[in-house]
Image (spheres, grey):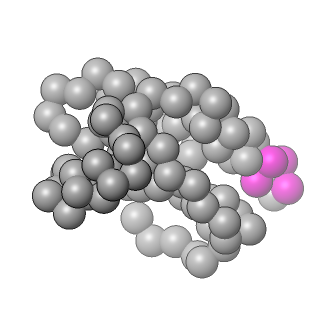
Amino acid sequence: MSHRDDALRVVMWTKPGCAACARTEALLTRHDVPVLEENMTDEILQFAAEMGFREAPVVLGVRPDGTSTWWAGLDFTRIAEFIGLARKERDRV
């Protein structure tokens, strides 16, 4: 996935067979949020533990203004935020 520095995007680190991972990706992509899926690595697992995350996926969401947020698991609040941002981006075009 190529992107501009100010482009809305999500990077998800996932595990095989992870239902929350599949659901998160499906919800985001259904609403035109660009998603890059990566395999969970030891480095991301360590980062997740340091952040207190205990679920997959581990997600980095980058907003169009360049700010970002991290979350883990099936977080409907964050997913809804990024769906809303994608709609605003689409409506501006």
Q: Residue at x 14, y 34 (%)?
A: 16
**Viewport quadrant of the N terminus:** bottom left
Q: Residue at x 42, y 39 (%)?
A: 72
Q: Which residues are magenta?
A: 88-92
Q: Residue at x 35, y 25 (%)?
A: 20
Q: Residue at x 52, y 71 (%)?
A: 3
Q: Nearer the viewer, residue 69 or 3?
A: 69
* Above or below 73: residue 11: below
Main secondary structure type of the part rendered in magenta: helix
* Above or below 75: residue 29: below
**Viewport quadrant of the C terminus:** bottom right
On screen, residue 16 versus residue 21, left or right, reads left
Q: Is residue 91 magenta?
A: yes
Residue 90, horizontal then vertical, whole percent: 75, 49
Q: Is residue 45 magenta?
A: no
Q: Nearer the viewer, residue 85 or 29?
A: 85
On screen, residue 21 versus residue 9, left or right, reads left
* Above or below 34: residue 56: above
